């Protein structure tokens, strides 16, 4: 009786920032000094199980407060919702959040407001998976094609993908699921590592970390490029020398170039046999990516971490702009929109290699890739999840990497939950770390 | 001496909301109940002239506080800047705001953060024009092509428009400027009106307002469509009957449709000879607009009020997606980015018919269209500025319409300044209006 009536009672938000800029972890051609941060929320209920839903937007420091304000603006749509109904149909909330007739002016479906929607929606999925007693990847893999399709917003998609086509893809995708699940639980899902390749690292550190990546069993590493061509040639040479000819070497320009420049620069690095060039130009430039892809072939083109929504992904696929689709768990409108994006990728036969790193992004995306493998694409060929070894220690159920593979998480939920002591210590500006830091520097940081 | 050293001393922000939803002014197929609002800012200086720069983001109610938070996040980049240098080169600030290595994660160049940048940048242009003693349109028309091009960010544009090409367009555009200025001052710039066509209005009110538009000298009106086809047929018939065959009748779906639906629905209204179909689908769908344009020709396709930045406009032009480009003064990164958009439109030979209405959008865009006429496109053929007769009474220098034309504003600045009593009365939630309203409704609105 009490359980049946359980409702969402609170959406508590936190501005959490980690001082990563001091180590140059995460430095690239456009982001020289990120402080990896999370605009974090906890859904609380009055259910007897006391389960919570955790979710967050990832940011890189300044503006994390704006992102928290955006999550707060969604609160009235969430408070009071019956928990069982919400968890049985997260799309019911997704549609309300995306459709808010006043808030949608601030997007629509892009930027700060859309990332906030993603954080709230992901928290609902975390709660739903906990209530089901399953890790999210299994909740999704166990679901029927019809229910999964009911979770997708097909508005603006039907010229590329209809609900009927989506159901067919999912029906076909289930064939052999049990065998793949056994393989997943045994081997894990392949990862690749960006840890050696940040721009701020010395060649010596790059080489050392590349060797280490090999020793750890990774078969692909990634280097940041795009700030200085001579540096890039030197660093790519060092990396290729370190890993030998058989390891895939991806390069990532973080949106640094115009179209022509992207082609010239990438070709100047062709001798080091880069596997893909990532974010060669603006994430908004569908036609630009198509031109670059033609210009740099057979080097592959990858993008996605800043692609704002399913509508832009649809066009990247329609225009033949990308070889590799890099979805991000916290950029778009949560699991619901990422289901749409996985279905689009499957429809066009483009492999998904998620963006990760940051704070908690590895924890989230592993669930989406594992679902994709089990019940949609059915393959890990040419598919890898990015891995960066930052900040996992702050999570209750951190990712586990063995021999270059993500182990399938076993704990119920979306692996989104941060440790209470981490939240307390790195809350900005009042947590222990920042209060001490700001006192020391008289408020000049960050 | 004091003047030479003058600096920006404050960026004061205000959350201003007007209760427009109660009259159904501004209702359309996606926005049934907007409360037209402004996330408003005032740049203050320690200069002896005591001039201020005013700017704002337009929103439609909820989330206006998030927009204010985003403007506040930019404050550290503005405070302390030397006023003379800033006004001589607004692009110097534009580049810093767009390039902030942490804040750009929240876009980049889209949504809440980008609209905030636009508000701040527009406030700088307001201040610059006031200091020059000129309305903004004249400041721009008086400027050299080289200086104007220095104000444009060509990143991600050079596959469609280079700085040299832009200078050539502006050099050619100046020919005959003096004659056109005389004509502008005498006749004004043509407008069209959306006042008859809101979805929430009865057919009787629609007909009455359409007759009134004719009597006021407008040669184009616009109707909202997209909620119900039978209603749209009835309303379009009423409007066409009211205005006769020679007045242009534009229709506006406010992003309501998928691609196929947009084509079918628009063709179903073809018998009423619509001049353009506006926002037939997602503003992000460059390829979708191209398909729709092919499908509904000879009816024209128009979009822009929700187009997030110059990169998407570039592609809409490259793909042949639009016949009419509807820039918005407060959606993108301010005057600097709108200069880029005007140049792109000129390069592709597509007429610009700005989006306006809302709060203060008419006041702003008139300056951009008048500059375009005087010094770039050189023509008003097939060019009209949207006009809606809402909320002008709150501005110090409101637009003036005569015989369906915008009169050229004479007061120095960007016409962006709201009356202090309006700011005080409609500040949310503490202004007189809202305090009384919230007390009456026990905090349930809006």
Image: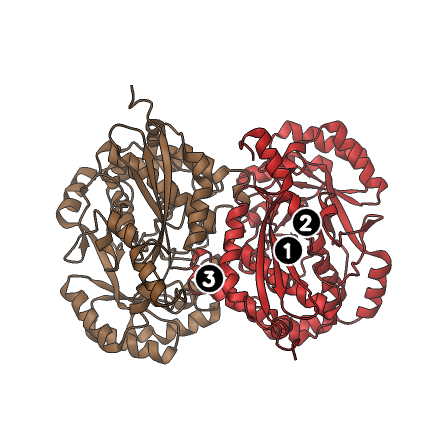
Chain colours: A red, B brown
- The answer for which chain carries disc 1 is A
Q: Secondary structure at mark 3?
A: loop
- The answer for which chain carries disc 2 is A
Left or right of B104 in this view: A201: right
Q: Quadrant of the N terminus of chain A?
A: bottom right
Which residue in the structure is indicated by mark 2? Answer: A356
Both marks 2 and 3 on one chain:
no
Left or right of A201 in this view: B130: left
Q: Secondary structure at mark 2?
A: loop
Left or right of A119 in this view: B145: left
Left or right of B329 in this view: A398: right
Both marks 1 and 3 on one chain:
no
Do tag 2 and tag 3 residues touch (Cβ < 8 Å)? no
Q: Position of residue B154 (x, y in %)?
A: 45, 38
Marks 1 and 3 sit apart, C-alpha to C-alpha, by: 22 Å
Q: Secondary structure at mark 1?
A: loop
Q: Position of residue A110 (x, y in %)?
A: 51, 55
Asked whether residue A110 is in view, the answer is no
Q: Which mark is residue B282?
A: 3
| Of labels 2 and 3, the one closer to you | 2
In the foreground, A147 or A317: A147
Q: Residue at x 29, y 22 (%)?
A: B2
Residue B251 lies in what quarter of the image? Answer: bottom left
Do tag 1 and tag 2 residues touch (Cβ < 8 Å)? yes
In the foreground, B136 or B311: B136
Residue B293 lies in what quarter of the image? Answer: bottom left
> How many C-alpha atoms fall within 10 Å of the one at disc 2: few (<14), some, or many (≥20)?
many
Do tag 1 and tag 3 residues touch (Cβ < 8 Å)? no
Q: Which mark is residue A83?
A: none
Q: Earlier in the sequence, mark 1 or mark 2?
A: 1
- The answer for which chain carries disc 3 is B
């Amino acid at each position: 009786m009490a359980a049946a009536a359980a409702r969402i009672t609170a959406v508590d938000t936190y501005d959490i920032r980690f001082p990563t800029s001091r180590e140059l972890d995460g430095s690239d051609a456009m982001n020289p000094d990120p402080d990896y941060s999370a605009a974090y929320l906890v859904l609380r209920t009055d259910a007897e199980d006391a389960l919570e839903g955790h979710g967050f937007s990832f940011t890189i420091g300044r503006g994390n407060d704006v992102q928290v304000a955006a999550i707060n603006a969604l609160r009235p749509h969430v408070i009071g919702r019956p928990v069982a109904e919400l968890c049985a149909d997260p799309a019911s909330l997704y549609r309300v959040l995306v459709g808010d007739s006043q808030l949608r002016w601030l997007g629509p479906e892009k930027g700060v407001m859309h990332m906030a929607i993603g954080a709230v929606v992901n928290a609902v999925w975390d709660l739903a998976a906990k209530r089901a007693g399953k890790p999210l990847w299994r909740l999704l893999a166990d679901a029927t094609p019809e229910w999964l399709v009911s979770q997708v917003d097909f508005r603006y998609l039907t010229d590329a993908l209809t609900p009927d086509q989506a159901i067919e893809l999912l029906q076909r995708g289930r064939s052999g699921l049990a065998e793949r699940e056994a393989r997943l639980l045994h081997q894990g899902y392949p990862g690749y590592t960006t840890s050696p390749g940040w721009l701020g690292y010395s060649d010596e550190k790059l080489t050392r970390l590349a060797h280490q990546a090999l020793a750890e069993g990774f078969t692909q590493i990634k280097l940041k490029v795009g700030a200085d061509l001579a540096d890039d040639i030197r660093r790519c040479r060092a990396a290729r020398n370190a890993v030998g000819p058989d390891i895939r070497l991806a390069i990532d320009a973080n949106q640094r170039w115009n179209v022509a420049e992207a082609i010239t620069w990438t070709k100047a690095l062709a001798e080091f046999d880069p596997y893909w060039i990532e974010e060669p130009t603006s994430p908004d430039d569908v036609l630009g990516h198509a031109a670059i892809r033609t210009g740099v072939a057979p080097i592959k083109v990858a993008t996605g971490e800043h692609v704002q929504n399913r509508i832009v992904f649809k066009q990247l696929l329609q225009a033949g702009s990308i070889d590799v689709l890099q979805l991000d768990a916290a950029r778009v409108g949560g699991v619901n929109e990422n289901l749409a994006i996985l279905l689009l990728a499957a429809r066009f036969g483009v492999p998904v290699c998620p963006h990760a790193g940051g704070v908690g992004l590895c924890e989230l995306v592993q669930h989406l890739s594992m679902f994709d493998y089990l019940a949609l694409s059915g393959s890990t060929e040419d598919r890898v999840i990015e891995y960066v070894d930052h900040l996992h220690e702050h999570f209750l159920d951190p990712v586990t990497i063995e021999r270059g593979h993500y182990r399938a998480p076993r704990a119920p939920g979306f692996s989104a939950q941060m440790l209470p002591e981490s939240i307390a210590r790195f809350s900005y500006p009042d947590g222990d770390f920042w209060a001490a830091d700001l006192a020391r520097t008289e408020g000049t940081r960050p």
